[in-house]
Each structure stands twice: as structure tokens, then as C-alpha cells.
Amino acid sequence: MRKWFVVWLLALLPVLPANAQGDGIDLPTEWYILLNSGVVQRYGLGAAGVVTVTPPDVYVVDFGIAPDGNWIAYRTETGLYLDNLSDMDDAPYQLEGSTADVPPLRQDAGQTITWGQDALAYTTIYGARVAFDIASGSPRFADIATSAVKHLSWSPGGTFLAAEVENNVWWIYRRNGYQMDLAGALPSSFGTDWLDDGRLVFAPAEGGLYVLDLFNANRQVLLAEPPQLYRQPYVRQDGAILVFTRPLDDEILGETGAFIQRLEPNANGVYDVVETSANAVDMSGLKWAPRGELLVAFRDGGLNLVVNSAEGTFFVDIPVDDVVAYGWGPLRPAPVRGVSTPGDVYFRAPDPFGVLQVWRLNEDAPIMLTQAISDVNGYAIKGDQLAYASGGGLWMLSLNDPDTPAVEFAKVNNTAADLSFSPDGSSLVFATSNVVSGGVYQVSALVQTDANGEVQLNPPELIIPNTDGVDYSQPSFAPNINALLVRVMDETGGYYQLFDLASGELIDVGVYDDAHWLADGRLLAFNSTGVFILDSVTLAAIPVYTAQQETILSVSLLDSGRLGVLVKPDVVVGPSAVVLVDVPITGGAPQITAEPGYIFNPTIARNTIFGLTRAGGSIMIFDLQTQTQTVLRAPLAAMDWTFID
């Protein structure tokens, strides 16, 4: 056990000074802390820092984070509210009024509000309550009558709910439609954790470690023999169990002293003890952090991260006092530095100083390509050339030699964005949103020098001027005709037009949420009704997929020649998981081929889905071939993805 604690100690030590300055600390996932002042703060990953996530004018008494990491449920004296953390300007949704009560018990970091797959459970003065069908905006409720509950825990599939009451007694309820039926009870257990959707690991007062099999007539399976005492079991993602343990009558350790033990299943499914820590720890106020590589000490309103090393137990102070409760965001795959992707993948993300730069994914780690002083507002790639807009200029950078400084080749408005190369790479188009001379511009992309070697600035030409109430953006060259696709915004909303570069004529394409060129010159577009393929000459739209009470997020042509359509169910409130629908272009039934789950702002390209863990969060990559997720340690808040074969 000492080995992995030493690794975490070494990982934490470099971030302690940064933490003291208010910067981010290295954690397994986002950490949420409720202060006595009634606000919830989020401690982000890496350099994400500390952010208050509840409204400043409310006093929060308890909270729970949704499994997508983008929604929070919190309770005040006026009711229970749900709030979207990715859009905090929106008013929170009131799930229940003052009848939601307040938690009668709040101790030992117990969860008094907890999200399930499609339900929310919370403690009340009479026991607990479960809200079902939240996403519809018309929730249904079921009451659980019992003594005061101090901790609630859903099974991974949302079938069972474990409720801890005083004196270490546990009641387990099974969901039955919109009701919760009593399914089992534990006369005593010092902590529990779910092994899977129907098996609960528990540690009775008299000793031993067991599994309660709720799908098998509540059969109890012995994991570790009594009278050895076991406390606070934690099930890791790999199925290993971490637990505190000590002999029954050990007078030296006392009531709160214990060793940490790891049990793993062997080939026969029987759990064996594989490691026991050499040093004892004080269990009082200790809880496992997600992934089981850290513990949290919650004592007297203060928090510490606990690291056990070969030299003993170390406490890492968290500079916050008067803590009422804490909770964790969803546990993602362990962050990595780099990832292998098909083709080159580029995106924009902030540098360590908060300036938006252009990055490229790499197996070792993402590489920051630009060194702009001000935000890169847009970029385009053609061959080995990267053009980008920053600080009122257009710049060209060689991807073959990114260490050579970029060259400014045109002066533009500070709002210049949406860059696109012509098929031959000789010119660029971009859009500006300034009031006086906004619109779509074209400029030569050839970097030319005079006799003295000085770069000659190329003059941009305004080819589609914005007019009163009409704004043009997102210009992109057609691969096979002399035309641009542009997005138009006016008082009626957003739509697309085709701009003939020879005649200057604008031709309506249609009302779509997104449209882009395919390599053969056709257009791929989608709106709230479905997905369409358009002929670039006739602009005839052929429907290839019809939306089914869902929101279409991204569409791309996959390596298989079929369409990949990312969708999520339409909901009134709460989280919604993303699924991939495989759509045959030439006929046949669409089918769901992947369920990547909760990904914020996803984009699909070839056989890969790119997105974020949450708004402003870490990069998440889902490989469609292996059906696996990867989370990158840095940078955060990626956007504006570009994929080059």
C-alpha cells in the first residue's frame, strides 16, 4: 500500500505553493465544498482554480452534483433547485418548494442529495424523498418513511438506493416504477459501497467484510473473516476493494486506529488480501476520495488531503475553514498527457496566461503552436501553413518549422475570425463583426517581401458587407466550384447562403444549425428536424436522418462511408447523455453504435468524438473503434476543432 501513496505524495508536493496562491490543485476529479456562508465552491483540475458555483444571493444548506458534472442540485430554505453550471446566467429550476425540507442530519460528509440515472434522492425530516422523471419538467415523487437519514447512495445502474440512518443502520430500497420498495436491511455497517448495480459491500460492527447480493435473495457472501474489524470499504473502478482494518481487541490502535488493506478478486472471483499498509492511520473523519488514491479528513469544519507514505501519514492542508459539507464531480478516466489520433487534430485553448492559442494533439502531450500576445480569434490550415487572426493582424506560421516566428501578412479588424483557405491555398476569407465595415473579406494568403526582405502587407477586400440587421460569418470555400458557403443572421434567425465569387450573387441554401462541405462538393447540414445532404449546384436537400425527440449535436462522414450523428435526448431540465447514431447514406435503418455518455459540446470526426468533461473542463476523447474514453490533463476549455487527414 505504501507504494501508491508515495506516488501521490510526490504528485501533490509541487502543487502546494500554487494552491496557496489560489491556483488549482491536483485532484482525481472536481471537488465541491459547501462553506458555512452558504456558498458552494468548485476546486477544478490542474490550473482550473476555485470557482463559486451557486448564486451569491442564496444560502445553500446542502447539494449534490449530477453524473454529467454540469448540473447541481442544491437546497435552500425556500426549496430544492437544479442549476446548469455550464450556463449560470439562466435562472435555476425549482424542483420543489419549501416542502423539500432541510437535511435533519449533516455529518461525516454524508451525501444528503444524490443523483441517480434519472432520479434525484434527498433526505427529509421524515426520511427521504425521490424525484423521478426530472428531465420531463413534470417530476413524480415517492416518499421513504424512516428515521433521520444521514447518507444516501444509488447503485451504479440506479436500481437500488441505500440509506444510512443513525447507529450505522442501513435500509436498501429498490426502484419499482415511481415507487421505492424496501429490498433489504443491514443491522449495522460502518460504511458501504456498491460493487455493481445489485451487490453492496458492507462491514458489520462485529467484524468481517461481506457482500449483500440483492439480485440473489439478499445472499451474503463473506469476503474477509471476522472477528477482524473492517471499516469504510471503497470499491475502485478496477473492482479492487480498499478498506480500513484492525484486530478486534487491539488496545494499541484504539477505536479509531486502523491499517489500510487492498483486496482483489482472483481468477475464481474470490477476493484475496494483496496488500496491507505498514503504518496505521486515524480513521476519525476519514473518507475515500474518488479513485481511492487519496483520503479526505473532515474534522472540526476543516479539510485535509491525507497521504500515507513510507515515512508516515502526511496531511495536506486545504486553505478553507468553516466547511459544512463536500462532494465530488463524476469520476472520469485517469487523465493522461497525450493521445494518438487518426490524422492531425487542431483546436484553440487558453495558454497558462489565459490567452487563446492554436494547439495540436500529440501522443506525448498537446503542443501549443502559436505564441500570440492576444487571443487567437480564428485559424485555418492548408498543407504546412497555419494562418491565424490575432491582435488586429493575420499571421502565417509554418507547421514544418513552428519554432520560426509567425509572419504578419495583413492588417485586419480586431474581430476577424472564421478563417478559411481557398482550395489552392492562394487566398483566405474571414469575417468581422465590427459595426461600420463588418462582413466577409478576402485576402491574398501569399507572403511576399520587398527588395529589402520586408514582408508586404496584403490588403483585404470586403466582398460581402454586413447590412443593417444582417450579419455574415463562417465563410468557407467550396472544394469544386467558385463559391463560398456563409452563415447569415438577421431578425428571423440563422440560415445559410451560397456566395458566387464570380457574380457576387447570394443564393439561399436553407435554415440549418450547421452546414459544411464534403470533399466531393456536396453539403452536409442539419437542423432541429434532421440531417440533409445537398447538391452544390441545385442545392436540392435530400433527408438522410430524421430527429426523434432529440437534439443533433454534430454530424460527420465516418471512415466507413456512413454518417455519424451525435444526438442527445431532448430534456426540459437536467443532464442528458450523448449517443452516436450510425446512418447509412444509401438506405437502411439508423442504429445506435456507441454511447459515449456525458460529453460537453462534442464534435465527431472520422472515428473519434472530441469534447469536454464539462463547460471549460478537460478534453475528453472517445474512440469509436475501441469504445474507450480518454481525458487529457491539459489544456482546459478546448474549442474550434479542425481535423486534417
Image (tube, grey):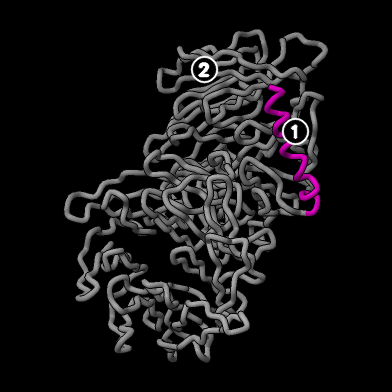
Amino acid residing under circle 1: Val
The secondary structure type at the circle numbered 2 is strand
Q: Residues within 10 Å of mark 2 (few under 14, many from 20)?
A: some
86 inside magenta stretch: no
Q: Residue at x 48, y 53 (%)?
A: 611
In primary-sequence order, the first of circles 2 and 1 is: 2
Residue at mark 2 = 265
The secondary structure type at the circle numbered 1 is strand
Q: Main secondary structure of the magenta part?
A: helix
Quarter of the picture containing the N terminus is: top right
Name the foreground residue: 568 vs 414.
Answer: 414
Q: Position of residue 348 (x, y in %)?
A: 54, 62
The image's mark for residue 306 is: 1
Q: Residue at x 56, y 84 (%)?
A: 457
Report whether 360 appears left or right of 568.
right
Q: Position of residue 627 (x, y in %)?
A: 40, 40
Question: How many tags in the picture?
Answer: 2
Amino acid residing under circle 2: Pro
Vertical position of residue 112 compared to residue 382: above or below: above
Q: Residues within 10 Å of mark 1 (few under 14, many from 20)?
A: many
- The magenta stretch is 1-21
Vertical position of residue 170 compared to residue 226: above or below: below
